[in-house]
Image (cartoon, rainbow, N blue to C red):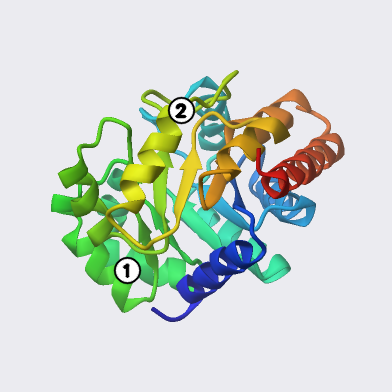
Amino acid sequence: MTGQAELLGRVLARAKDEDRAALVGYLPAGFPTVDGSIAACTALLAGGCDIVEVGLPHSDPVLDGPVIQTADDIALRGGVRIADVMRTVRETHAATGAPVLCMTYWNPVDRYGPERFAAELAAAGGAGCILPDLPVEESEAWRKAAEQHSLATVFVVAPSSRDERLAKITAAGSGFVYAASLMGVTGTRASVGREAEELVRRTRATTDLPVCVGLGVSNADQAAEVASFADGVIVGSAFVKRLLDHSGDPAGGLAAVRELAGELAEGVRRRG
């Protein structure tokens, strides 16, 4: 696979060569504003993240916890559109040179048109798409469009996934595998738990793709714990919460995001 998906692979491989996990940050487009989200994504990468996921806000974010739901609601009330998501991807990648993925539910992509969405994401410099609610069995149209435009297709696996199911999901995906550390919705947690380590072990038995763990990581110690067994550590709600905590103070929010990225970057290098 060429293009920005290749860049994603190189960044993940470089982290492995440095004997550490990659740090992947998530923020929704349009939150707190479109310009604000671009600045926040850029700050997140400047602070120490290797990769960023730009969320496409959705009116029914069934897999997201209250923090991200709140941010999505603010973005939607602000009038965010798919064009704004593409602009966020484009300007973040242009400013940093880092791999930028789009994380989205399937419905907006399906309504927009998979081919059109893939073409615009690739033109914006996107590295791929994370599609948490798209069943592999229904993914052919998307995967065909993604492959045509050299985009990675990242699927999500969960602790409830049986081994045969894991093999089917990982065979269809590219870029990396997103391992949800526990059952439930996104959000910060006191402990990431051992379920995640077992899921990574089982997933790796089915694929050579890097396995990145998300859901629940919010501080350097948790990042270090996950980095001890995963290829990447994904953090979303903790970054969003920093921006929510600085509502009305854009500069303070950006500084807080950059600071947290630095702490987490130190954590993934510490490895437990």
Quadrant of the snapshot with the N terminus: bottom left
Instruction: List x then y, in percent, for residue 176.
Output: 42, 58
Instruction: List x then y, in percent, for residue 103.
Output: 45, 49
The crowding category of the residue bearing disc 2, from other C-alpha atoms within 10 Å (few below 14, some 14 to 19, many at least 20), is: few
* Residue at left offset 50%, top offset 58%: 101
Can the viewer see residue 115?
Answer: yes
What amino acid does circle 1 point to?
Ala
Instruction: List x then y, in percent, for residue 207.
Output: 31, 59
Most extreme residue toward the bottom is: 2
223 or 94, nearer to the observer: 223
Q: Is residue 39 above or below residue 160?
A: below
* Residue at left offset 58%, top offset 24%: 188
* Residue at left offset 51%, top offset 47%: 230
Can the viewer see residue 155?
Answer: no
Q: Nearer the viewer, mark 2 or mark 1?
A: 2
Q: Is residue 61 above or below residue 31?
A: above
Q: Is residue 44 above or below residue 65?
A: below
32 or 176, nearer to the observer: 176
Which sits earlier in the primary sequence, circle 2 or circle 1? 1
Q: Which mark is residue 194?
A: 2
Q: Which mark is residue 146?
A: 1
Quadrant of the snapshot with the C terminus: top right
Image position of 265 (left or right of 63) = right
What amino acid does circle 2 point to?
Arg
Dots 2, 1 in contact, CB < 8 A: no
- Total labels drawn: 2
Image position of 153 (left or right of 160) = right
The crowding category of the residue bearing disc 1, from other C-alpha atoms within 10 Å (few below 14, some 14 to 19, many at least 20), is: many
For numbered disc 1, what is the local secondary structure? helix
Instruction: List x then y, in percent, for residue 239.
Output: 67, 36
- Mark 2 → mark 1, Cα distance in angstroms: 33 Å
* Residue at left offset 40%, top offset 43%: 200
